[in-house]
Amino acid sequence: MGFFDNLLLRLDESVTGLFGQWNLWTTVIATVFAGFLTYQIATRQEPDTHPFLLARQAEGSPVRQPGESAVYRSQGAPHGMPLNSGLNVKEPGASKWARGRDGDLRDVWRQAVAGVQEDGPTKGATGRLLTVLGIDKVVEHRLDDVTRQINLIGQHILDQGGNRVAIYLPNSVELIATLFACSFYNLTAVILPFDQSDDAVISMLRRSAADTVVTAPGSFPFDLVVKNYPSLRQLIWVVDEGSKHLDWNEVPQGTGGSVNVSTWQDIVNDSPVDAGKALPPLEGQKEPRDVTVFWVSKPGQPEEMVRFTSANFVSAIAAQLFAIPTAQRMGPSDVFLPADSLANTHTLVLTLAALFSNASVAFNSVAAQAHDLAVATRGVSPTILVATPAALLKTHKETSARLDASLLGRALHRLQTRQLTQNGVMPAAGDGLLSGAYAAAVGRPAGSKLRLILTAERVGADTPRLSSAVLSDLRAFTGARIMYALTAAKVAGAATQTAFYDYRVVADGDGVHFGPPLTSTEILLRDMGQWKTTDESRAGEIIVRGPCVAGNQAALGVAGRIRDDNTLAYA
C-alpha cells in the first residue's frame, strides 16, 4: 500500500471516529463557536482613523533654539509650508483650481447669504438663523432681513458719528448682526462679556474708548454710565417684543441731550422697505477694522483687553473648518448651538465657521449663563454644540448617577466604552434594541441627532478639567464626538485642539491633554523655572505663534509639556 493510500485510510478513520463520537454537547460547542466567529466577522469595523495618525499628531522642527523646545505644528501644516491664514475665497467664475484670497469677516456673511457653492445636491442651500424663546417657541430670521438690519444699523451708527461700537448683548442675532455691521461700515467692534457688574461695564467702556453702545434694556446701567462716562454719544436699545410699546428714546434728565438714544426696531422699521437689501460692494472697500474683546479670567479680576484684526479671525475660522474631516464637515443639514458666551473668541470663531459653512445657527440668550445642557438645548435639537467644561461635568455627574441604578445600563456602557477606546469606533446611535436601551438608561433625549461637541480649557481661568475618562464617558452618553481645545486671551479661536477621531483614554483615565496645534498655530515651550527641555522631557512656558494670534506671538504664562504622541498637556 502506497503513501497516499495510507494517508487516505487514516483520514477516513479520523473522520469516522469524529462523527462516531458526536453528541449533543459537541453540537452545542460547535454552534457556539460558529456563532462567535460569525458575530466577530459580521460586526467587525475598521477604526475611524489609522492608529498611527493618533500616535504622532504633530510634527516637530528639526532644529530648536537654546532654552526652547522644537517648534510643533499640525500634520496639516508641516514645516516649510505657510500656516493657514485665510478662507480661500474665490470670486464668481474663478477656476476651481485657482487660489482664492484670504478674505475677511464680510466674506463670512456673504457666504452665508450666497449658500453652498460646490456642485452637489446641496448647491445653493443656505442655513437658517433661529432664536429660541422659552421651551416651545423658536423664531426664524430670514437672511435677507438680517442683511437689511446689518446695513441699516451700520449706516445709522455711521451717520450719527459713531466710530467705536460696544456690543453688550447676550447670545443673539443682533450681536452677530452688529459685528457684521461694523465690518461692512468700517467701524471698530468692541464685544463686552455680558452680565457684568456696573463698575466692570464702565471700566471696559473707558478702556475701549467706545462712543456707541448696542445693548438690551434691564442689563445696561444707562444712568450710571451717562454720569460716569461722558464720552458716550450714542445708544441703541435692542427691545424685546413685550417692551416695544414703551418709549425708549427718552434721555435721563441732567445729561444735556448729549446721548442720542434710539431702538433697533425703530431704526429698521422707520427706514424705507427697499433700503438696505443689498450688501455694500466689495470693490474699493477698506480692510475691516479691528475687533476688541475682553478676556475675563476670574470673577473680580480686571479683564484683559485684546485687539484682534479681521485677519486673525479668518485664520482661526479656516483652522476650525480644516480640523473637521471632509466627510464630517458642517453643512446645511446641521443645527449649530453656541451654549457658551459669544464674547469668548473660541465660541465666536466656531459660530462664524458655522455661518460660513451654511449651517443653521440657533441662539438662546440663556444658554451662555446656564451650566446645564438640558437648559441650554431646550426648544432646539442641535447637531453641533459648543459647551462649557462645567456644563459637561454636570451632565457627566448626573448621567453617571442615573447609570449606576441600572445593571443593564452599566453592561451596555462597558460595551460602548470598549468599542470607543479599544476598537477606535464611534458607536452608532441607531434605533436598535440595545441602542434604544442604552439611550434610555443614560437619559439621552429621543430623536437626538447631536454628533459633535466642542469645548475648551481657558488658560488662567481655573476652568474645570475634563479627563480622558470623562470625555470617553461623555462620548458614550451623548453619542457625539468631542473636541477639547486650549484657549488663551491673545489667540483667536484655539491654540491646540484634540483630534476629531481621538477617543483614547490616557493612562488610568485621569490624564488630560489638549491635542496638537491647529493649522493656524505653532507652539513651542520655553524654559520656565523648573520646567526645561532636556533629552528626556519637553517642558516649559507655552508660546503660541501664528496668523490667528494677536501680535503674531503670545506667551501663555503657564507651563506645558509635549507628550509622547506630540500633543500638548499642562506640565
Image: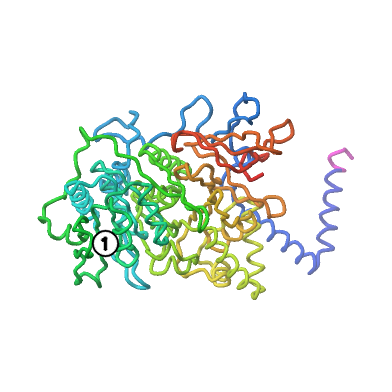
Q: What residue appears at the point 76 percent right and 65 percent down from the top-left corner?
A: 27
Q: In the rendered image, which quarter contains the C terminus?
A: top right
Q: Name the magenta segment's main secondary structure.
A: helix
Q: In the image, is 369 to the left or to the right of 514?
A: left
The answer to whether residue 135 is magenta is: no
The answer to whether residue 5 is magenta is: yes
Q: Quadrant of residue 99?
A: top left
Q: Position of residue 196 (x, y in %)?
A: 42, 60
In this figure, what is the number of numbered marks? 1
Identify which residue, 532 or 147, lies in the foreground: 532
Q: In the rendered image, which quarter contains the N terminus?
A: top right
Q: Visible in this render: residue 42? A: no
Q: In the image, is 284 to the left or to the right of 224?
A: left
Please say if 102 is above or below 28: above
Please say if 302 is above or below 84: below
- Magenta-drawn segment: 1-6
Q: What residue appears at the point 67 percent right and 51 percent down from the top-left corner?
A: 511
Q: Which residue is under mark 1? A: 238
Tag 1: amino acid: Val
